[in-house]
């Protein structure tokens, strides 16, 4: 059993330039699709966002097959490699900066496709299984997640309420760190708008916190921004 497994890995590693046949091409495509599906499934299950792009998950499923096919077509032909590089150089890819985790998954899928394309089926499956298991493990233990989150709090107060320490007691009661970033007048100077950057624990009851702030500012406008941008902060 162990010898057969070892022979699978050693033969795959030795086949640096596998012969391009129909059966080999179909095997390569099938394995790359299965690995792409496993990686895409891992991404969907370990994503810490409630919404992810279906197009991105589809791309991760197809990318290993695309890379594997390119490697198959190039083989050891240097002329084909240069021709392919020239073809890709005239294509301009435009995309918004993505999540670093998304970039890692893209590299993951490309590595899987590359391994399958060069004929290292055993190593491709092994690395994919190990990395997917690692992703699930890190997601289960919530590795790297912050226990506190930053929010942007905008509060309108009447002019007779001193804004310097207006909500200091409320912040202390809920154990919230805060920093007053901006003060401006509204309604011809009859009201003040305060902008705080607050750092709260994930277990903080935000409704109770806002109710306490509302009792202090006389039911005037309150806005708590869940995902403030760097420009707002």
Image (spheres, rainbow, N blue to C red):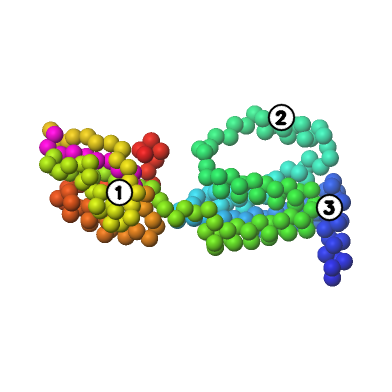
The residue at 83%/64% (across/down) is 5
Mark 2 lies on a secondary structure that is helix
Say whether residue 49 is left or right of residue 69: left
Are the residues at dot 2 and dot 1 in contact (C-beta closer than 8 Å)? no
Label 3 Cα crowd, 10 Å radius (few <14 / some 14-19 / many 20+)? some
Q: Report, in whole angstroms, how far the alpha carbon at label 2 lies from the one at label 1.
A: 51 Å
The residue at 34%/59% (across/down) is 204
Q: In front: mark 2 or mark 3?
A: 3
Say whether residue 206 is left or right of residue 185: right
Label 1 Cα crowd, 10 Å radius (few <14 / some 14-19 / many 20+)? some
Residue 138 in which image quadrant: bottom right
Between 181 and 109, which is closer to the camera in this rendering? 181
Say whether residue 6 is left or right of residue 99: right
What residue range appears in magenta? 189-198
Q: Provide the major secondary structure of the magenta segment.
A: strand
Instruction: Return the mark for residue 13.
Output: 3
Residue behind mark 2: 86
Q: Report, in whole angstroms, how far the alpha carbon at label 1 lies from the one at label 3.
A: 56 Å
Between 176 and 52, which is closer to the camera in this rendering? 176
């Amino acid at each position: 059993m162990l010898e057969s497994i070892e022979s699978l890995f050693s033969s795959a590693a030795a086949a640096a330039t596998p012969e391009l046949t129909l059966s080999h091409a179909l095997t390569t495509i099938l394995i790359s699709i299965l690995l792409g599906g496993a990686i895409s499934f891992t991404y969907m299950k370990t994503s810490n966002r409630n919404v992810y792009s279906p197009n991105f998950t589809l791309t991760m499923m197809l990318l290993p097959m695309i890379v594997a096919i390119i490697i198959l077509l190039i083989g050891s032909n240097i002329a084909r490699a240069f021709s392919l590089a020239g073809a890709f150089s005239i294509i301009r890819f435009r995309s918004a900066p993505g999540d670093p985790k998304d970039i890692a998954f893209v590299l993951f899928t490309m590595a899987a496709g590359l391994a399958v394309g060069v004929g290292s089926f055993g190593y491709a499956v092994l690395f994919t299984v190990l990395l997917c298991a690692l992703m699930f493990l890190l997601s289960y233990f919530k590795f790297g997640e912050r226990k506190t989150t930053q929010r942007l709090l905008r509060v309108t107060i009447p002019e007779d309420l001193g804004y310097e320490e207006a909500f200091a007691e409320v912040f202390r009661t809920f154990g919230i760190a805060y920093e007053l970033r901006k003060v401006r007048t509204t309604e011809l100077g009859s009201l003040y708008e305060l902008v705080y950057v607050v750092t709260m624990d994930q277990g903080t009851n935000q409704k109770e916190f806002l109710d306490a702030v509302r009792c202090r500012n006389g039911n005037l406008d309150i806005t708590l921004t869940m995902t403030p941008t760097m420009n707002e902060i």
